[in-house]
Image: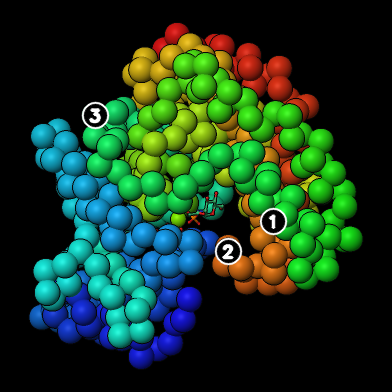
Amino acid sequence: MNNNTEQKWEAANAFAVKGQVKSCEPYGSGHINRTYLLVCEEHGQDVSYILQQMNQDVFKNIPGLMKNVKGVTSFLRRQIIENHGDPDRETLNLVPTREGKDYYQDSQGDFWRAYLFISQATCYNLVKKPEDFYQSGKAFGRFQCLLADYPANDLTETIPDFHNTPVRFAAFQAAVEQDVMKRACQVQEEISFIREREKEMGLALDLQAEGRLPLRVSHNDTKLNNIMIDDATGQALCIIDLDTIMPGFSIFDYGDSIRFGANTAEEDEKDLSKVSLSLPLFEVYTKGFLEGCEGRLTQTEIEMLPYGAKMMTLECGMRFLTDYLAGDVYFHVSRDGHNLDRCRTQLALVADMERKWTHMEAIVKKYKNQ
Ligand code: ADP
Ligand code: GN1
Ligand code: MG
């Protein structure tokens, strides 16, 4: 993905923003797109936007992806207006280009989009208050509910087999085999840890094949920094990062939130003694998510929630290791060994979940009938 200053300014000036473009600086801590805070000035007042260069290496069908984003945000906007909410803050809003399009392709062939900036709200990398995590559980549960009425057939599958763990495992095995960076010898312990758990990886797909686990329109990337918490009220305000909305499993939306938010350490913490599954955070999120789902999950989905958490953590650890072995070509990194550090936190968290398994199951059981 190229990215030079000229290209950035070309994109910044392509959108129908208010006033004059003033600054455009890198923003946020996403691993995939290149995100900028675009500040414009109109009548002496600053107006901010998010400008994003979409990652074409990761998303092969940008027109299809943008059709999803437009469709889902318009659908959510209608529901928010019906519920007397604030449609400019409770969902993402695309800013059109000066030609009235939803995205812009620059002179080098890269794709850009702009959103209204949601101010006075924060994306966290670590849970600050358990109440925030409860709120985000409720919001992601409600999001599943809202999307239940979205026409799944209109959605483009933006990354095929995104949470197909056996397919991810095959890619991991190939990366170990190819070992292009000659790094496999340093990570034998991690490789064995993943291989020892291969048998568990196909369970969700097996249940789906037996008709016991439904495919639902899901978000698929529900980590805490993909939800904005209102600074004033502490309420979950807006779910962002809609690039991977496509049919998936509810247990994986739940699980990815646990993977990131119920970890007592950050995803890239180097000191593994800080990594653990917080059972109190696991509990508040479970309560919030099940409340937000309003009884729509099946008994099997509910029973499989702990498995969803473990599998999303294992899969993510495996993806980080695959990328480390391949030479850091997928996730953005900002230091040597960044993907390996991320892999290690995920595997340490899986090990802790295994130790706490009976507690996790007991907590889910406690909230089962909500
Ligand atoms: P990535 O796919 O790379 O993770 P995201 O779409 O999640 O990209 O955006 C990266 C970060 O930018 C988010 O974590 C958030 O901090 C910020 N962000 C994205 N959209 C908005 C918005 N509309 N308003 C304010 N901040 C935003
Ligand atoms: C990526 O885009 P971002 O940073 O929200 C990744 C997720 C991983 C996550 C790990 C499209 O999410 O699948 O779980 O990093 N998104 C994509 O932090 O691959
Ligand atoms: Mg993100």
Q: Quadrant of residue 332?
A: bottom right
Residue at 33% from the left image edge and 72% from the top image edge? 111
SS for dot 3: loop
Q: Which residue is mark 2?
A: 330
* Quarter that holds the C terminus: top left
SS for dot 1: helix
Is any part of residue 370 visible from this angle? Answer: yes
Can you give x and y, in whole percent of width and height, for residue 274 in the image?
A: 74, 47
Could you tell whether 22 is left or right of 360 in the image?
A: left
Can you give x and y, in whole percent of width and height, for residue 89 in the image?
A: 23, 51
Along the line of sight, the residue nearer the viewer: 345 or 232: 345
Q: CA distance from mark 3 to mark 1?
A: 36 Å
Question: Of label 3 and label 1, which has the lower sequence position?
Answer: 3
Marks 1 and 2: in contact by CB < 8 Å? yes
Residue at 35% from the left image edge and 69% from the top image edge? 52
Q: Which circle marks residue 322 in the picture?
A: 1
Above or below 105: residue 245: above
Crowd tier of the residue under label 1, counting other residues whose Cα lies within 10 Å: few below 14, some 14–19, many 20 or above: many
Question: Of label 3 and label 2, which has the lower sequence position?
Answer: 3
User: Does the residue tagged 2 have its C-beta within 8 Å of any atom of ligand 2?
Assistant: yes
